[in-house]
Amino acid sequence: MIEKFHNPPEATPGDFLLYLKSFSMKYKIISLLLVFYSLANAQHSKFSVEASYPLTTGQNFIGQDYNGVLDLGVKYKITTMPLVNLGASVNASLLKYRIEGGYSPALDAYVGFKTSLYLIQPRVYAEINLKRITKLHPSIGLGYSFFLFKTNFDSGYFSDESNNEWGINLNLGLSYDLLSRMYIQAGYDFIKLTQLKDGTPSTSYHTNAGIIKLGLGIRI
């Protein structure tokens, strides 16, 4: 008995599209598995990113006048040792100060302004490794703080202004691991301004600043 062999059916454009969709789905699944694998091993990552809410504090021009909006930070762990980790970081903060317009008889106009303060803080830091409480990480950092002020007036009688100030920054921090790659953190920045705007008195009110930051960090 002679068996009849049938030629396979010809592929149609629809079959080709189904193949592409199947390949695309497999690729996505493999990609997701690789992402989850990398996240599971993220505790070995040297980079971390942080988002915090800055709270101004103290009897100084920052604590009395400005309100925090947002702080973003990036950390890089340079070296890891049994007792301490050494690294470098940079933070960028936004603070706001606004005076609502009040009537000025001399100008016969309502005068108000708003100031945006952009704060850039590069520093080096040391993170202490606690043997008994491995999820808790105290740290200390030292660096600079650069203040960039931009003031916009509501009235056309005054021109918008911008000026820069800078100084030394001491940071004390504490973080706690929620997961292998996620942690909550709190920090305090003490800033001593050494370069002031012309005409600004060199009093503690104008040269000292304190900022508390509360936020969340992720190791990437």
Image (cartoon, grey):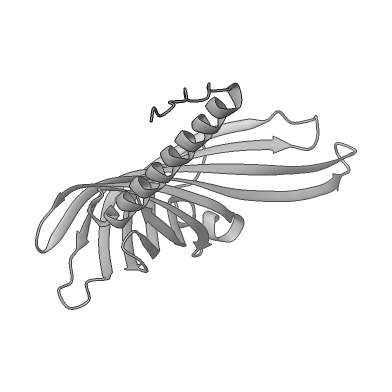
Task: Specify the farthest residue to the left.
Answer: 82
**On the rendered structure, is 74 left or right of 165?**
left
Task: Specify the farthest residue to the front.
Answer: 1
**On the rendered structure, is 21 left or right of 100?**
left
Task: Specify the farthest residue to the bottom.
Answer: 132
Question: Relative to the observer, which residue lies in front, 71 or 194?
Answer: 71
| Residue at image location 36% in from the left, 49% down from the top | 33
Residue 78, image quadrant: top left
| Residue at image location 52% in from the left, 60% down from the top | 56
Residue 29 seen: yes
**On the rendered structure, is 32 left or right of 41?**
right
Q: Is residue 118 above or below residue 37?
A: above
| Position of residue 77 measured from the top left corner of the image (x, y, whole percent) | 23, 48
| Residue at image location 50% in from the left, 58% down from the top | 54
| Position of residue 133 measured from the top left corner of the image (x, y, whole percent) | 22, 76
Residue 138, image quadrant: bottom left
Q: Is residue 149 above or below residue 133?
A: above
| Residue at image location 37% in from the left, 69% down from the top | 178
| Position of residue 39 measured from the top left corner of the image (x, y, whole percent) | 34, 53
Q: Is residue 5 above or below residue 144?
A: above
Question: Relative to the observer, which residue lies in front, 36 or 90?
Answer: 36
| Position of residue 150 measured from the top left corner of the image (x, y, whole percent) | 60, 36
Residue 195 seen: no
Question: Relative to the observer, which residue lies in front, 199 or 174?
Answer: 174
Quarter occupied by the N terminus? top left
